């Protein structure tokens, strides 16, 4: 089986990234016998944490690496500098078998499993990418993205993918989710709780969307609205897209 390059990097750098993180944040320059002994003990500890004990797994569970939820992306940061943590995922469960026996379609069962894997990782303090889940379930990343988006539209719940939580890639952004929830009638404190964002951030996104919507009554030119509101043209385009999509969904 051909393993995608991004996933191969995950395996290669999972253990290495933790050692680098340890050096950068705890030890600085490793020198002296005492420091080396301490370092050796920490290496052994990390190695033990990374070793999978088969007896600890239940039927249907697998070992995986997720990105540490606190290790947010930044400019110039690549896979070798990303901190990964070992986690256990429920790949196949009794619930999956029950859903099949009860007549749920393959699509419904697949969506349920996709959401479970993302939340499994989140509950253990890590995040999975669409590529992770696609590889585990032998589906495309596009399929994962569609199922996640459909689930969030149906339930108004956040799925804790890395793209969403760290606001990267083509995932449905927190900004869009927050504004969509507000248009559906949710109050700011509720939206803050659902999206795990501060009330200040939620208010800022909503206020910006309101200002753009009012400006759209006069023009839909992003450049003119941007000059009027003191926003970048690209940011205005984002809000116009969000507002139009939300209103279109409400009319359907």
Image (tube, rainbow, N blue to C red):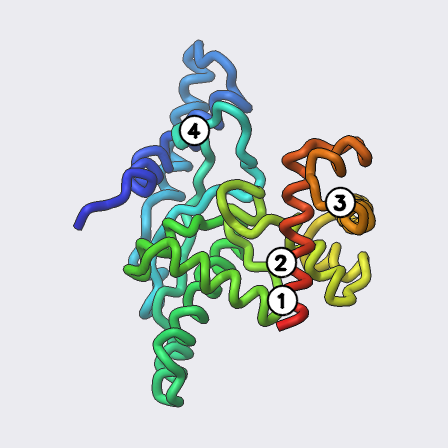
Q: Which residue is mark 1?
A: 249
Mark with earlier residue (3, 2): 3
Q: CA distance from mark 2 to mark 4?
A: 33 Å
Location of the C terminus by quadrant is: bottom right
The disc label shown at residue 245, or none:
2
Among the 4 quarters of the image, the one containing residue 9: top left
Mark with earlier residue (2, 4): 4
Q: Which residue is mark 3?
A: 219
Q: Is residue 30 left or right of residue 250?
A: left
Q: Are marks 2 and 1 in contact (CB under 8 Å)?
A: yes
Q: Secondary structure at mark 3?
A: loop
The disc label shown at residue 131, or none:
none
Q: Are marks 2 and 4 in contact (CB under 8 Å)?
A: no
The disc label shown at residue 78, or none:
4
Q: Nearer the observer, disc 3 or disc 1? A: 3
Q: Residues within 10 Å of mark 1 (few under 14, many from 20)?
A: few
């Amino acid at each position: 089986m051909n393993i995608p390059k991004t996933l191969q990097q995950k395996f290669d750098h999972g253990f290495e990234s933790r050692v680098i993180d340890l050096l950068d944040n705890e030890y600085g320059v490793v020198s002296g016998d005492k420091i080396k002994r301490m370092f050796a003990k920490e290496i052994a500890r990390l190695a033990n944490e990374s070793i999978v004990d088969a007896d600890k797994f239940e039927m249907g569970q697998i070992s995986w690496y997720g990105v540490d939820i606190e290790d947010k992306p930044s400019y110039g940061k690549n896979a070798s500098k990303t901190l990964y943590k070992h986690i256990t995922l429920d790949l196949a469960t009794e619930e999956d078998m029950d859903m099949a026996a009860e007549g749920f379609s393959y699509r419904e069962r697949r969506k349920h499993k996709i959401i479970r894997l993302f939340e499994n990782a989140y509950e253990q303090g890590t995040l999975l990418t669409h590529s992770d889940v696609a590889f585990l379930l032998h589906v495309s990343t596009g399929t994962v993205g569609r199922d996640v988006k459909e689930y969030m539209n149906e339930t108004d719940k956040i799925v804790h993918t890395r793209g969403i939580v760290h606001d990267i890639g083509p995932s449905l952004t927190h900004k869009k989710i927050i504004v969509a929830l507000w248009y559906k009638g949710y109050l700011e404190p509720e939206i803050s709780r659902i999206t795990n964002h501060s009330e200040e951030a939620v208010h800022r996104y909503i206020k910006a969307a309101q200002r753009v919507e009012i400006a759209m009554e006069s023009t839909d030119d992003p450049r003119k609205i941007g000059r009027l509101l003191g926003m970048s043209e690209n940011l205005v385009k984002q809000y116009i897209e969000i507002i139009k999509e939300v209103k279109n969904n409400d009319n359907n």
